[in-house]
């Protein structure tokens, strides 16, 4: 029963995150508590920062599941495209994953943009 409630919590969270995005964006659940958002047609880097802040706010809003309340936090890693080097989708995801771990190191409810070495 608890696992079923947590699954409903993930569905609620995914809906909230989707509602933060624009029609041209895509949200996918990779599994467990990992999601990927593809933010399209951004004219400047600050546009992504606004969307990331909205996502973090949606994640931090408690999810009510009957008498159970889930309190969550998120860590978001950003990888930007295009870059000066050739880039595959897998490499872009790896960069976002590395940035996410840097965000986690900052503490709860944080985000980080991937830095090229």
Image (tube, rainbow, N blue to C red):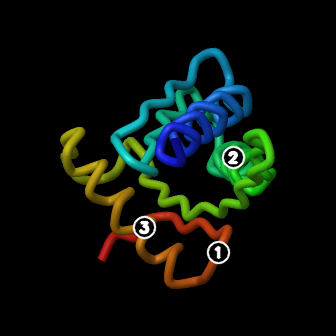
Q: CA distance from mark 3 to mark 2?
A: 16 Å
Going by the image, does 92 lie left or right of 17? left
Q: Report x, y in % for residue 50.
A: 75, 47
Mark 2: secondary structure: helix
Q: Nearer the viewer, residue 116 or 57?
A: 57
Residue 9 image-quadrant placement: top right
- Nearest the camera: 35 or 52? 35
* Residue highlighted by disc 3: 99
Q: Which residue is mark 2?
A: 55
Pointer 3 and pointer 2: residues touching (CB < 8 Å)?
Answer: no
Identify the residue under disc 1. Answer: 108
Give SS at disc 1: loop
Left or right: where does residue 43 sit relative to residue 93?
Answer: right
Q: If you read the primary sequence from the N terminus, does the residue marked by circle 1 or circle 3 appear first?
A: 3
| Residue under the point 53% across and 48% down | 2
Q: CA distance from mark 1 to mark 3?
A: 14 Å
**Figure check: 79 above or below 5:** below
Residue at image coords 30%, 77%: 117
- Count how many numbered circles sit on residues in the image: 3
**C-alpha distance separating marks 2 and 1:** 13 Å
Residue 11 to residue 73: above or below: above
């Amino acid at each position: 029963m608890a696992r079923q409630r947590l699954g409903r919590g993930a569905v609620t969270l995914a809906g909230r995150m989707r509602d933060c995005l624009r029609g041209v964006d895509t949200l996918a659940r990779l599994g467990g508590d990992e999601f990927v958002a593809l933010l399209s047609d951004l004219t400047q880097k600050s546009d992504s920062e606004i969307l990331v802040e909205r996502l973090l706010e949606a994640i931090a809003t408690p999810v009510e599941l009957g008498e159970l309340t889930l309190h969550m936090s998120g860590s978001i890693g950003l990888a930007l495209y295009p870059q000066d080097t050739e880039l595959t989708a897998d490499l872009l995801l790896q960069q976002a994953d590395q940035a996410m771990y840097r965000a986690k190191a900052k503490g709860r409810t944080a985000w980080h943009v991937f830095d090229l070495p």
